[in-house]
Amino acid sequence: MAGYRSGGVRVRVVGAEDEVVRLCQELIRIDTSNPGDHSGPGERVAAEYVAAQLEEVGVRARLFESHPGRTSVVARIEGEDPTRDALLLHGHLDVVPARAEDWTRDPFGGEIADGCVWGRGAVDMKDMDAMILAVLRDRMREGRRPPRDVVLAFLADEEAGGSWGAKWLVDEHPELFEGCTEAVGEVGGFSLTVPGDRRMYLIETAEKGIAWMNLTAKGTAGHGSMVHPDNAVTALAAAVGRLGSHEFPVRLTKTVRAFLERVCLAYGIEFDPENPERALAEIGPMARMIGATLKNTLNPTRLDAGYKTNVIPQGATAQVDGRFLPGHEAEFFTVVDDLLGPDVERDFVYYDQALETEYEGALVAAMEASLLSEDPGALPVPYCLSGGTDAKHFARLGMRCYGFAPLRLPPELDFSGMFHGVDERVPVDGLRFGARVLDRFLDRS
Ligand SMILES: [Zn+2]
């Protein structure tokens, strides 16, 4: 709780820590499921809710609609020194869909049970949306301006690549982000418990690139009973088999190397660059995600050909989910083209760049110091995300992008399994911790 004097009367106002839980619950209750087209409920209701929370404390919030119902919110808060470069804080408003029958609790109920707020978006990422709102509302009520201009963006459509959210805003309204040189959003800032009751806090400084590809083989149509060497299905299936079974070599990027070195330090084992999997074996379920940042990957996901058993079709198609490390994009596509051979063509279903920024400088120091002041056992570490976020769009404007949505988590929670998983939930204490850290971070930013 915080208090201030108004007209001689002591007024009690709710502080960020008290508000963050309510805000997270209320955001979860607004269904913003994003099925990847415009058939979902959209983000309009959530955007209006966010705008109202900001307007209530005197922040002018602007709504931007890329398509009916696909709404983002942007606001700029003037800092103490508006001549400094601005900082962007961004979160997405949409969530992936949830099948209620698979869940223990209503995915859009925002219930509190077992010390957690439950619901779709609890960790991805209405938690951070709530933290940003709670902290800025508290600061505005108390007249605590951030040290420099802060741009807030609450975005539509991140879960489908941001075409109707961050990408659209960056393309159509880049002026909103004028002066922003650094950005803070998902996925990072959460803790991973290591020996000695200490916690590593994973700060995202890199993201793999995305190459969702469509593969096409062309052949000659014909009767299934005849001798027929030019079969598109055979050519495509062979290529898909080569791609799916290819083993890419380990490539330690500077971010992944720094992460593994610190894991080894925390577990008291020696770092062996020849055997990075040794360090990964220590970190439990998180290894599923971190393991994918040791190398480029290719996973065939869809196949389609033909319409009748005795008809050889003229063509066959497949789709492959490819992901490449920062600095290893050219190598990735050389390998893909070698594996495809001359008979199979590729085009993109979706492509986006890989990112990697330095784990150094004043903003990183601010993240580390704010974590340490709330958790003296904190061990902040940089890491590479195996997926992609809206950071990819903001990076096109030249911003250095970080994933820092601070959460102190209990050791037993499989946090990486919560993302897009069933029974998504966030500890109440973790949310309150996050609000405190984010507030301290803003003080130092
Ligand atoms: Zn997310």
Image (spheres, rainbow, N blue to C red):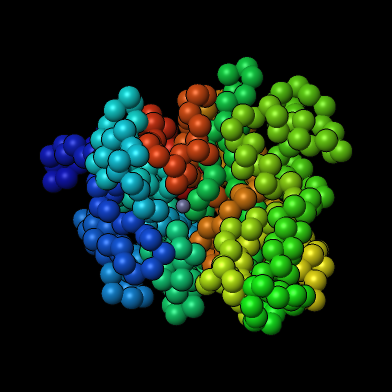
Question: Where residue 151 sits in the image (x, y, percent)?
Answer: 43, 62
- Going by the image, does 19 lie left or right of 193? left
Question: Where residue 232 sits in the image (x, y, percent)?
Answer: 68, 74
Q: Residue at left 13%, top 41%?
A: 8
- Going by the image, does 361 lie left or right of 179? right
Q: As drawn, which residue projects farthest toward the front?
A: 225
- The quarter of the image holding the N terminus is top left
* Depicted 178 relative to depicted 320: above or below: below
Question: Where residue 156 sits in the image (x, y, percent)?
Answer: 38, 64
Q: Residue at left 59%, top 71%?
A: 310
Res 123 seen here: yes
Res 86 seen here: no
* Depicted 423 relative to depicted 323: above or below: above
- Going by the image, does 303 lie left or right of 123? right
Q: Residue at left 79%, top 37%?
A: 276
In the image, 204 versus 76, the foreground residue is 204
Q: Residue at left 64%, top 36%?
A: 287
In the image, 285 versus 270, the foreground residue is 285
In the image, 238 versus 444, the foreground residue is 238
Question: Where residue 130 sits in the image (x, y, percent)?
Answer: 34, 47
Q: As drawn, which residue projects farthest toward the top?
A: 196
All told, the count of numbered labels is: 0
- Going by the image, does 46 lie left or right of 245? left
